[in-house]
């Protein structure tokens, strides 16, 4: 078991990573909550619902279930979850547990942040992707015009990461999660990036390899979040690959392309753009080959470039309708760059020709 402590100017909480933690979850509760609501999706709850209830012992426990998939992160499910919390008579000293992947963490966290002006919640991630989304205190739901457009900064009181839950993940979810680990490698160091490049996702990953790389990714994010909790400067670096990635994800229709698959394409494009802007070789080919070996979708066919640019203008980093992208001056040296629409269109067309 390993613990990473997140300490910001306004909050502090621990991320605990290890095996079999769901059955021991009572040991990690910061308070003795009498009333707990577990929010999960139908797939995850079927696998782990009873186990987490057993781990919580003789407390008053209720649950709310939403359909699996990113499409559930919407205003209708948000309202239904609030209604169920009221029906279960949760008070301001109750606890919400987000049991699931990034979608559940974002949705349940946003419910917790607004229910009675905010109650405690704990993240219990069950995907690799959620190593990123569960840390840092961003919670949100989607709007039809953009991803995570309705949300707030609201940190959990703890993150309990039981890596036993990752053993049954389908290959597509493994790919999705490792895109964010790769992102942490690219924005942090050559050594971490090279380690990610040498990871073969088509074979079974050992628990130790998975744990080590998850903890490294969490530490990269923790270091940035601790220095910039509310995304006023360097926290924007964590959005490497996300400006185009979010646009692709929205244009494809939420759930049709995973978040990580879209972000991986976005990172590849960001490397191409970084070469053009900073006139320095970037590991475009290395990342491209890694993505192909590990069966990521590597194309932007079927997307209308003007619509992608319009989506990118809705990105939360955009200012005065100018698109800001996180680029790399070198591996481990991210920067935020404001890019002209015409340059962006030219580069997107060049990218489409290169990758298909």
Image: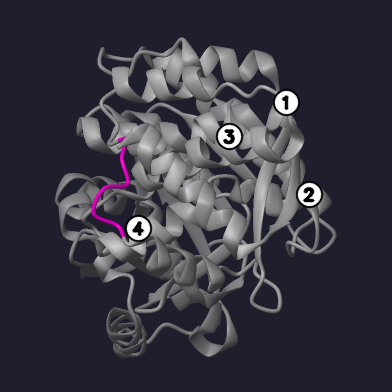
Tag 1 near tag 4, CB within 8 Å: no
Look at the numbered disc 1 and give the secondary structure of its residue. Answer: loop
Which residue is drawn at the image coordinates 66% and 37% (left, top)? 276
For mark 4, what is the residue? 249
332 relative to 193, above or below:
below
N-terminal of the pair, mark 2 or mark 3, is 2
Q: Is residue 301 magenta?
A: yes
In the image, residue 232 lies at what x, y percent? 79, 64
Mark 3 is surrounded, within 10 Å at the Cα level, by few (under 14), some (14 to 19) or many (20 or more) other residues, namely many
N-terminal of the pair, mark 3 or mark 1, is 3
17 relative to 319, above or below:
above
User: Which of the two discs, 3 and 1, sits closer to the camera?
Assistant: 1
Report the magenta residues as a range.
298-303
User: Which of the two discs, 1 and 4, sits closer to the camera?
Assistant: 1
Disc 1 from disc 4: Cα separation: 29 Å
Look at the numbered disc 3 and give the secondary structure of its residue. Answer: helix
213 relative to 309, above or below:
above
Look at the numbered disc 4 and give the secondary structure of its residue. Answer: helix
Q: Is residue 39 visible?
A: no
N-terminal of the pair, mark 2 or mark 4, is 2
In the image, 55: left or right of 148? Answer: left
N-terminal of the pair, mark 3 or mark 4, is 4
Q: Which mark is residue 147?
A: none
**Secondary structure of the magenta portion, mostly?**
loop
Mark 2 is surrounded, within 10 Å at the Cα level, by few (under 14), some (14 to 19) or many (20 or more) other residues, namely some
For mark 3, what is the residue? 271
In the image, 155: left or right of 170? Answer: right
For mark 2, what is the residue? 226
In the image, 75: left or right of 159? Answer: left
Mark 4 is surrounded, within 10 Å at the Cα level, by few (under 14), some (14 to 19) or many (20 or more) other residues, namely many
Closer-to-camera residue (259/42): 259
Q: Which mark is residue 280?
A: 1
């Amino acid at each position: 078991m390993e613990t990473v402590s997140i300490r910001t100017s306004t909050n502090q909480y621990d991320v605990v990573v290890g095996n079999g933690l769901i059955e021991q979850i009572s040991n990690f509760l910061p308070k003795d909550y009498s009333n707990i609501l577990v929010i999960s999706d139908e797939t995850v709850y079927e696998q782990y619902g009873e186990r987490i209830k057993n781990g919580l012992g003789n407390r008053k426990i209720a649950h709310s279930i939403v359909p699996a998939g990113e499409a559930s992160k919407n205003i209708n499910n948000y309202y239904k979850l609030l209604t169920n919390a009221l029906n279960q008579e949760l008070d301001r000293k109750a606890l919400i547990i987000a049991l699931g992947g990034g979608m559940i963490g974002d949705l349940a966290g946003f419910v917790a942040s607004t229910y009675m002006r905010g109650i405690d919640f704990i993240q219990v991630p069950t995907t690799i992707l959620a190593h990123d989304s569960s840390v840092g205190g961003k919670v949100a739901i989607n709007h039809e015009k953009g991803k995570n457009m309705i949300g707030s900064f609201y940190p959990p009181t703890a993150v309990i990461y039981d890596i036993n839950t990752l053993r049954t993940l389908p290959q597509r979810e493994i790919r999705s999660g490792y895109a964010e680990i790769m992102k942490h490698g690219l924005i942090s160091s050559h050594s971490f990036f090279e380690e990610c490049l040498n990871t073969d996702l088509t074979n079974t990953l050992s628990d130790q390899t998975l744990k080590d790389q998850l903890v490294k990714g969490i530490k990269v994010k923790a270091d940035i979040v601790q220095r910039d909790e509310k995304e006023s400067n360097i926290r924007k670096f964590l959005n490497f690959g996300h400006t185009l990635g979010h646009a692709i994800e929205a244009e494809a229709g939420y759930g049709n392309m995973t978040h990580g698959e879209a972000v991986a394409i976005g990172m590849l494009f960001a490397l191409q753009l970084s070469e053009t802007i900073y006139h320095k070789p970037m590991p475009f080919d290395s990342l491209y080959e890694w993505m192909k070996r590990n069966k990521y979708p590597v194309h932007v066919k079927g997307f209308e470039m003007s619509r992608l640019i319009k989506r990118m203008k809705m990105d939360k980093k955009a200012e005065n309708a100018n698109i800001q992208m996180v680029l790399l001056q070198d591996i481990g040296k991210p920067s935020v760059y404001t890019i002209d629409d015409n340059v962006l269109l030219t580069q997107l067309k060049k990218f489409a020709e290169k990758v298909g």
